[in-house]
Image (tube, helix red, strand yellow):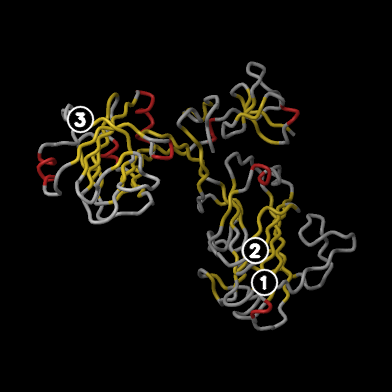
Amino acid sequence: MASKHLMPLLLAGCILPANGQEVKSQFNPDKVILPSSQYTPADPYTASVWVFNGGRRYADQYYNHIWATPPADSQGNLWYAPEYAQEDTRWQNARAPYSSDEYYLGQKSFRWVEAEIMGEIYIRRTFTINRNIEADIFLSCGHDDAPSEWYINGTMVHSVGDAWNNDEYVLLTPEQKALIKMDGSENIIAAHIHQNWGGAFADCGLYEADMIENSTLLSTLDDGAWPCRYYMLNYNSDMADAENANWASEEEDEDDWISGVGPFSNDANIFLTTEWPSQERPILVRRHFSLSDAEISPLAGSSVKLLCSYDENPKVYLNGSLIWQSDGWNDNNYATVTLSDEHKKLLHKGDNVLAVSLTQGGGGGHIDYGLIMEQEISFSGIASPTDEPAASDPRIYNINGQYLGDDLNRLPKGIYIKGNKKIIKL
């Protein structure tokens, strides 16, 4: 999420977010709220299921055809509504996993349908939460096949129109997360999964996200062109002489280097900011960046990552030390390399240099690279909830630091930050 125009927010010892920073949600199967068969197979769950299995084998004219739906109850409630009464005798309790295999990830399956036989499974699963989950939440929604839908407390939160993906998970929006009651009262996840052909699988679960603060130490093309100094060698064989002369060191005299902007490419593609005749000449690139005490302090407890899109044979140096190299090229993709603790110690206050060399090759050539720092946010440092808003600052933010305006009355129920204190609107 973009972090421009945001007020810095002190959260568990880190500033969140400020310019050049963003917060992202990362799926973590170890942070279980409600176990799923795919990601928490050792903790199988039981739910109410309604199955239609007419024994009909798959045929192309029936692709994605829904064969049956549980009837509404005597009050007109549909099968996914929290108030729905399971009056139809076809509802039964069954333990997951719900699969066409005899065993799925080591657990004996409830085989609601056989492979190649078409059918439907409808699932109603109740649960309670007795704590306030401030991080984002992922829905685990593995399915084989589709169409498939998932509901939380009667509202659809995800649907799939085609194909299958046992590993699928999706990030709930703030509005979808707000559907979940965390006061100990009952919630329901309802799911429908259709089976076309081949194997079958149906699943649901909830997982608390790792909230990762992402700070840019050295930008890539995503943030626009970047300044640098560069030098083009004549032949690949000249690279050894340059390395022996410690061209990537902090002490390198740059008087003979060209001052320019990257990324570099040999043709008109997304990386072409400065032309590099990569079929003819190798290139050396040096980028300077400065770190303050405040930026150095969190490095030890953070993950520092090199991002690099290259063609070809890059060698990357941090303050004169080789930290990564690779053969070949990766087209328009980016290699993501986590720096070791020893490599992170190369970073220091003041001026730093991240340098890269690339060889001349027969095809295309390009280079874009940068550094980011990722740090997991702990919510344990937030003050205790209060019903009273802080009066010192009228601006209101969500827990990810997004500015929402000054009028709490216009906002839905939820958790907000006002005056650097957490408030709850009920």
Snapshot quadrant of residue 196: bottom right
Alpha carbon separation for disc pair 1 and 2:
8 Å
Disc 3 residue type (three-letter)? Glu
Is residue 207 or residue 65 the one in the foreground?
65
Which residue is the site of mark 3? 250
Instruction: Measure the alpha-carbon separation of dots 3 and 1.
Output: 62 Å
Give the crowd class for mark 2: few <14, some 14-19, many >=20 residues within 10 Å.
Answer: few
Element at label 3: loop
Residue of label 2:
161
Q: Position of residue 296 (x, y in %)?
A: 34, 28
Residue identified by numbered label 1: 64
**Crowd band around label 1 with a 10 angstrom C-alpha radius: few (<14), some (14–19), many (20+):** some
* Amino acid marked by disc 2: Gly
Are the residues flagged by discs 1 and 2 in contact, CB closer than 8 Å? yes
Image quadrant occupied by the C terminus: top right
Q: Identify which residue is drawn at 74% across, 47% down.
A: 185
Q: Is residue 358 left or right of residue 166?
A: left
Q: Residue furthest top?
A: 392
Q: In this picture, is 98 found above or below 420? A: below
Of residues 339 and 334, the one nearer the viewer is 334
Amino acid found under the numbered disc labelled 1:
Asn
Toward the viewer: 201 or 4?
Answer: 4
Q: Secondary structure at mark 2?
A: loop
Total labels: the figure holds: 3
User: What percent of the width, then of the height, locates residue 201?
Assistant: 60, 69
Mark 2 and mark 3 lie on one chain; the one further toward the N terminus is: 2
- Of residues 232 and 187, the one drawn nearer to the viewer in this rendering: 232
